[in-house]
Image (cartoon, helix red, strand yellow):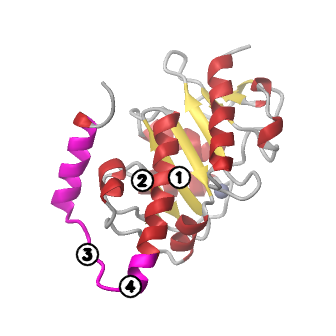
Amino acid sequence: MLLQQQRQKVIDIALKAQNEKLMPLTMGNFSIRDIETGYICITPSGMEYTLLKPEDIVVVDLEGNIVEGSRKPSIETQLHCRTYKKRPDVMGICHTHSTFATAWACCGKEIPAIVAELAAMIGGPVQCSPYAPMGTVELADIVSDSIGARNAVLMENHGMLSVGESIDKAFANAVIVEEAAKVTLYATQIGGMKTISAQECDYLRRETQENYGQK
Ligand SMILES: [Zn+2]
């Protein structure tokens, strides 16, 4: 089997995302890009995560053509492929419909940078990409453009997409966006929210990239 380890890792992340309650049912999709082959391992469409086996994860090329796998890949395969195409630094992607992030997305509003770890990990406010129907190439193009150099973007009336240099980082970013979406909602209710300046966001991002975690 091609890329068995990577396929298992995609399943592990889908289960972690379900544990973190990042989406209802199977309304999310997860992928890894393999460094050596450039192939993408992505979750199948509409299958219960707890039942997934490595052979259920579909291996596709950068155009979305199936390389190996008998399952139908996620309907958002093009969303993943086009994001990988535009972001050579990205090796893992999570797409979820987590509640608080989706609430901001349903208002077409960006999540401002008020939470320090959002600035540090995502690089600034989480912008909201314009609406396009789910599962379309139009959506894939709009969202992969809107994310720019950041590590997450909201998708209007739909959900959010997070990326990272590994799927673990993409998953952590999905959790951070959801937490920030929740905190920011409470902060707006308290009133007098203080945003972090663009300059400070850049500083926090740089510092985190250089110094955070075990070397
Ligand atoms: Zn979706």
Point out the frontmost of discs 3 and 2. 3
Amino acid type of the residue tagged 4 in the rendering: Ile
Q: Mark 2 points at which residue?
A: 147
Give how far across and how far down residue 79 sits, in percent: 58, 47
Label 4 to label 2: alpha-carbon separation: 29 Å
Please state, as top left, top right, bottom left or bottom right, where the C terminus lies in the image: top left
What whole-number distance in Å separates the C-alpha atoms at marks 1 and 4? 28 Å
Q: Of the residues shown, which amino acid type is indicated by label 2? A: Ile
Between discs 2 and 1, the one toward the N terminus = 2
Question: Which sits earlier in the primary sequence, circle 1 or circle 4?
Answer: 1
CA gap between label 1 and label 3 equals 25 Å
**Which span is picked out in magenta?**
186-209
Ligand 1 location (quadrant) = bottom right
What kind of element bears circle 3?
loop
Q: Going from the N terminus, do you reach mark 1 or mark 3 first?
A: 1
Location of residue 60 by image quarter: top right
Q: Residue 12, image x and y in percent?
A: 66, 33
At numbered mark 4, what does the secondary structure look like: helix, strand or loop? Answer: helix
Amino acid on which disc 1 is placed? Leu
Does 139 sit left or right of 152 as displayed? right
Q: Residue at x 40, y 81 (%)?
A: 188
Question: Circle 3 is placed at which residue position?
Answer: 194
Q: Do the residues labelled 2 and 1 touch (CB within 8 Å)?
A: yes
Residue 190, numbered circle: 4
Q: Which of marks 4 and 2 is in front?
A: 4
Which image quadrant is residue 27 in? bottom right
Disc nearer the start of the sequence (4/2): 2
Question: 14 or 2: nearer the eye?
Answer: 14
Q: What residue lies at 62% left-to-right and 55% top-to-bottom?
A: 22
Residue at horizontal 27 percent and vertical 38 percent from the top? 209
